[in-house]
Image: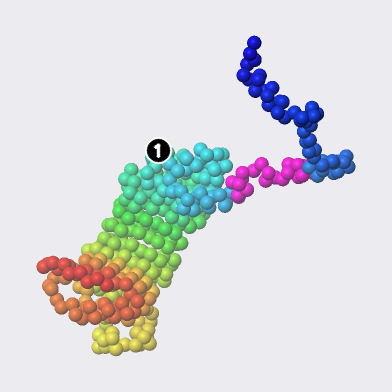
């Protein structure tokens, strides 16, 4: 009987590996080098010591994020890494308990323009260190919502209420101080387009002496009396926006006395003309008779200081839609505002199509002094644009 092929092949291979003399083949396996008991003991001691040191290392089982302090983690998360909106905060809080704790104790700025107002009280009570709040153009934000901000009033540094429905009642209640309370340390306040009156604006000026930026554009209750209050109480104010407010050149004269004022926006004020700009930089509405005998061009700096006693510290003036702008006014600004670096005279309005040669010459002189001028002339016939 014939053997299966598999068995026949195995037997054939075994016969080929068998030597001719019939001696069996032995396979030599190389053993590891001989290790004595003493060397083995020393090796095990080193391994045990290394494992013990690895266990005692506090950073052994820690993630890299756990090594960072809360302040460092807050700077990473809230310093431009994410947009500070309630939706993003909710996503961060869901990552881990530590992220939630860091957000509640370290968050200082919050954009609430898209938040649901019924959740405002919960947000203010949770994030206790908020000092920068933005409610711009939330039409539903009114007086009752201002009362919800009282827990963070003493820490506020920036509050933007542009286009909201706040009135004098909530403004005076929020910013008004009793005899025992300290002044509010707020530095930036935007109330543009609100219905506040001059009384509420004066309350703000008295109770917020640390204000550096104040925007009251389109507030019809702002008059010349408030301009006098600004120069008296707001000694640190650097930027003021009273565009489209019913102020006159007399109010601009008061702003000349503001010690720290650097930027002013008086655009589209219906009662203002070139005399308002002259009042801003000279402190007077018009030139007196003594000054009228000499041209501004021939007066040196010493004579200017002697006649006026001081020069303007303004570095930016925005006066769009202004009337009666001429070359003489630009020469006055060149002489009395040596620190001026930006001048916006776009949409300058005039009645007739006068010669602009002297005007262009005065503009070039201001440019040579380092002033960036934006100018466009509008008249009955059409619009002429001068790019500078």
Q: Which residue is mark 1?
A: 118
Whole-percent x, y for residue 178 in the image: 47, 53
As helix, strand or loop, the secondary structure at mark 1 comes to helix
Q: Residues within 10 Å of mark 1 (few under 14, many from 20)?
A: few
Relative placement, left or right, of 1 versus 54 is left
Where does residue 10 sit, x and y in percent of width and height? 67, 23
Vertical arrangement, residue 347 with respect to residue 129, above or below? below
Horizontal and vertical percent for residue 180?
A: 51, 54
Q: Residue at x 29, y 62 (%)?
A: 243
Picture layout, residue 204 above or below residue 112? below
User: Relative to the observer, which residue lies in front, 181 or 33?
Assistant: 33
Q: Is residue 104 left or right of residue 225?
A: right
Q: Quadrant of residue 302?
A: bottom left
Q: Nearer the viewer, residue 225 or 15?
A: 15
Query: In the rendered structure, which segment of residues is drawn in magenta?
Result: 48-69
Looking at the figure, which quarter contains the N terminus? top right
Tell me, yes or no, whether the highlighted magenta stretch contains residue 58: yes
Q: Nearer the viewer, residue 326 or 228?
A: 326
Q: Identify the residue at horizontal 57%, vertical 52% (top origin).
A: 72
Task: Report if residue 185 lies within the magenta region.
Answer: no
Residue at left offset 68%, top offset 44%: 60
């Amino acid at each position: 009987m014939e053997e299966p092929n598999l068995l026949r092949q195995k037997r054939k291979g075994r016969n080929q590996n068998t030597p001719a003399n019939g001696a069996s083949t032995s396979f030599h396996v190389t053993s590891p080098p001989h290790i004595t008991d003493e060397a083995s003991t020393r090796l095990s001691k080193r391994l045990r010591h290394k494992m013990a040191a690895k266990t005692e290392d506090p950073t052994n089982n820690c993630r890299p994020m756990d090594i960072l302090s809360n302040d460092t983690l807050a700077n990473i998360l809230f310093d431009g890494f994410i947009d500070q909106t309630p939706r993003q905060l909710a996503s961060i809080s869901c990552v881990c308990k530590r992220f939630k704790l860091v957000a509640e104790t370290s968050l200082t700025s919050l954009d609430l323009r898209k938040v649901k107002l019924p959740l405002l009280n919960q947000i203010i009570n949770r994030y206790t260190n908020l000092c920068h709040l933005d409610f711009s153009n939330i039409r539903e934000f009114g007086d009752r919502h201002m009362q919800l901000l009282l827990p963070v009033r003493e820490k506020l540094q920036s509050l933007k209420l542009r286009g909201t429905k706040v009135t004098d009642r909530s403004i005076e209640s929020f910013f008004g101080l009793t005899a025992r309370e300290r002044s509010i340390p707020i530095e930036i306040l935007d109330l543009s387009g609100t219905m506040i009156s001059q009384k509420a604006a004066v309350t703000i000026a008295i109770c917020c002496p640390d204000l550096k930026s104040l925007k009251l554009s389109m507030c019809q209750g702002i008059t010349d009396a408030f301009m006098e209050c600004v120069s008296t109480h707001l000694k640190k104010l650097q930027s003021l926006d009273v565009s489209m407010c019913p102020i006159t050149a007399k109010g601009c004269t008061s702003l000349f006395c503001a010690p720290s004022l650097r930027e002013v926006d008086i655009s589209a004020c219906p009662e203002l003309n070139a005399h308002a700009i002259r009042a801003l930089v000279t402190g007077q509405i018009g030139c007196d008779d003594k000054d009228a005998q000499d041209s501004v061009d021939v007066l040196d700096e010493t004579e200017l200081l002697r006649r006026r006693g001081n020069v303007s510290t303004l570095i930016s003036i925005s006066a769009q839609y202004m009337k009666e702008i001429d070359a003489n006014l630009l020469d006055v600004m060149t002489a009395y505002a040596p620190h001026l670096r930006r001048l916006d005279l776009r949409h300058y309005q005039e009645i007739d199509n006068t010669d602009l040669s002297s005007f262009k010459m005065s503009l070039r002189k201001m440019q040579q002094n380092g002033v960036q001028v934006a100018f466009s002339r509008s008249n009955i016939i059409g619009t002429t644009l001068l790019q500078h």
